[in-house]
Image (cartoon, helix red, strand yellow):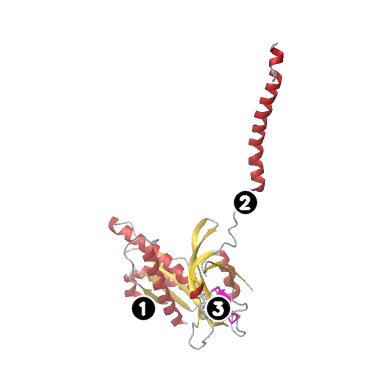
């Protein structure tokens, strides 16, 4: 009589319980493994991060202005804040251009109209390197490559700059 | 450029473009508790200061390891030793030697040094990471770079 009433037999009950617990244990082991396998995909990439440089798009004119900002950088032993700068202006096509101020010759800091003798050019004080306004190096001066250009994007009217890339 | 292996790699093929040596002169001593903190702070500022100047003009200057000496300055000994440093560096095509210091004692033996001594009144105390110190240094660096350019 008890057999009729018992809808789940002892054997079945044990089977269910063991399957359930076993399943949990297997899942507990597999999930971290899976997570580890796909982990590199989930990591936010630090390269190509954009930083707010504190400049509103409305304030950008066709005269280059210098902006300075800081980014976090992990550099071997140190994690530090590194300062970066750019010369930002609107070019002939009214597009925003952000040039790196690092001279492509030996790495000095160039400035817009840095010499009175060369108006409307970027000038490097170290070896009189010169660049056109669009960053093109002027032949006959030491630099052999144009100034690097920052990746940029505009969000809510604020300029964000990424990494400087050679052209 | 700095005295590091990757900068040396860059320096050797571009020697003729790098004609200026920057040598920070940094004092230290452990004989009086009262001054130790101040001197350590000045040493920190001097290191940052020299580093920032190097960043600004990196294509034409070489920042070498600082010259440390025990305070008070023993003029004769230190000047002689410093000049042997310069002699050694003259084996490369360097023509300008610039000494940066916060210690006014060097002013008295300036004429015996092979090179230009630039003395600055130091920030006496504070925090090197504070933004005021940061602004102060940035401002000074801009002016000193201007001065160094006038030697070229």
Marks 2 and 3 in Cβ contact (< 8 Å): no
Residue closest to the eye, B44 or B94: B44
Residue B83: quadrant of the picture: bottom left
Which residue is tagged 3?
A: A90
Does residue A71 sit above or below B96 in this rendering?
A: above
Does residue A1 sit above or below A32 in this rendering?
A: above
Question: Left or right: B129 with respect to A131?
Answer: left
Residue A139: quadrant of the picture: bottom right
Q: Mark 2 lies on which chain?
A: A
Mark 1 element type: helix
Q: Which residue is drawn at 44% across and 76% down?
A: B145
Q: Where is residue A24 in the image (x, y as percent from the top left)?
A: 64, 32
Of circles 1 and 3, the one toward us is: 3
Count numbered badges in the picture. Answer: 3
Q: Position of residue B138 (x, y in %)?
A: 41, 70
Mark 2 element type: helix
Specify the segment rendered in magenta.
Answer: A90-100
Q: Position of residue B82 (x, y in %)?
A: 42, 70
Q: Does the magenta stretch include residue A55?
A: no
Q: Position of residue B77 (x, y in %)?
A: 37, 68
Q: Residues within 10 Å of mark 3 (few under 14, many from 20)?
A: some
Report, in whole angstroms, how far the alpha carbon at label 1 lies from the one at label 3.
51 Å
> Which numbered disc covers residue B111?
1
Which residue is tagged 2?
A: A42
Q: Mark 1 lies on which chain?
A: B
Q: Mark 3 lies on which chain?
A: A
């Amino acid at each position: 009589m008890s057999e009729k009433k018992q809808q789940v037999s002892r054997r079945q009950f044990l089977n269910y319980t063991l399957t359930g617990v076993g399943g949990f244990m297997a899942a507990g082991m597999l999930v971290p493994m899976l997570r580890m396998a796909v982990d590199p995909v989930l990591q936010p990439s630090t390269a190509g991060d954009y930083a707010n440089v504190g400049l509103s798009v409305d304030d950008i004119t066709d005269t280059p202005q210098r902006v300075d900002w800081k980014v976090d950088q992990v550099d071997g032993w140190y994690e530090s804040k590194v300062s970066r700068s750019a010369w930002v202006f609107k070019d002939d096509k009214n597009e925003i251009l952000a040039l790196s101020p690092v001279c492509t010759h030996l790495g000095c800091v160039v400035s817009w109209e840095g010499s009175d003798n060369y108006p409307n050019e970027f000038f490097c004080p170290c070896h009189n390197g010169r660049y056109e306004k669009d960053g093109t190096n002027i032949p006959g001066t030491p630099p052999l490559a144009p100034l690097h250009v920052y990746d940029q994007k505009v969000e809510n009217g604020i300029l964000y700059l990424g990494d400087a890339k050679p052209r | 450029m700095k005295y590091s292996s990757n900068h040396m790699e860059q320096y050797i093929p571009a020697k003729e473009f790098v004609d200026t040596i920057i040598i920070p002169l940094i004092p230290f001593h452990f004989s009086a508790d009262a001054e130790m903190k101040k001197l350590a702070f000045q040493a920190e500022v001097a290191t940052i200061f020299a580093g920032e100047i190097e960043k600004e003009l990196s294509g034409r200057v070489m920042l070498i390891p600082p010259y440390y000496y025990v305070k008070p300055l023993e003029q004769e000994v230190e000047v002689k030793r410093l000049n042997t440093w310069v002699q050694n560096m003259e084996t490369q095509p360097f023509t300008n030697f610039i000494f940066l210091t916060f210690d006014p004692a060097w002013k008295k033996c300036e004429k015996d040094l092979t090179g230009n001594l630039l003395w600055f009144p130091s920030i006496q105390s504070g925090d090197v990471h504070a933004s005021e110190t940061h602004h102060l240094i940035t401002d000074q660096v801009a002016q000193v770079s201007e001065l160094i350019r006038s030697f070229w």
